[in-house]
């Protein structure tokens, strides 16, 4: 896996975790 791809994946996961922490009752995006 390329470094750029890995960074993008980690960034997306971090954003999803922040969204879930901010809105516990929100539905998952997928």
Image (spheres, helix red, strand yellow):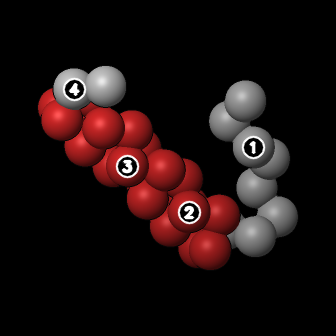
Of label 3 and label 1, which has the lower sequence position? 3
Disc 1 target residue: 28
Locate residue 26: give its quadrant: bottom right
- Pointer 1: residues within 10 angstroms few (<14), some, or many (20+)? few
Q: Mark 2, residues whose alpha carbon is within 10 Å: few (<14), some, or many (≥20)?
A: few
Q: Residue at x 43, y 59 (%)?
A: 14
Name the image quarter holding residue 25: bottom right
Q: Which mark is residue 2?
A: 4
Which of labels 4 and 3 is toward the front?
A: 4
Question: Are discs 3 and 1 less than 8 Å apart at CB?
Answer: no
Q: Which residue is mark 3?
A: 10
Asked which secondary structure carries label 1, the reply is loop
- Look at the numbered disc 3 and give the secondary structure of its residue: helix
For marks 4 and 3, give the CA distance: 12 Å
Q: CA distance from mark 3 to mark 1?
A: 17 Å
Percent across and percent down for residue 27 are 80, 47
**Upstream in the sequence, badge 4 or badge 3?**
4
Question: How much space separates mark 2 and mark 3, taking CA atoms?
Answer: 11 Å
Q: Residue at x 39, y 38 (%)?
A: 9
Query: Are the residues tagged 4 and 3 within 8 Å (C-beta)?
Result: no
Label 3: how many Cα within 10 Å (few below 14, some 14–19, many 20+): few
Tag nearer the camera, 4 or 1: 4
Secondary structure at badge 2 equals helix
Q: In the picture provided, is 4 more to the left or to the right than 10?
A: left
Placement of 6 over or under 24, stated as above or below = above
Q: Of the residues under marks 2 and 3, which one precedes in the sequence? A: 3
> Quarter of the image containing the N terminus?
top left
């Amino acid at each position: 896996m390329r470094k750029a791809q890995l960074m993008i994946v980690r960034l997306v996961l971090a954003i999803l975790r922040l969204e879930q922490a901010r809105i516990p009752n929100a539905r998952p995006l997928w």
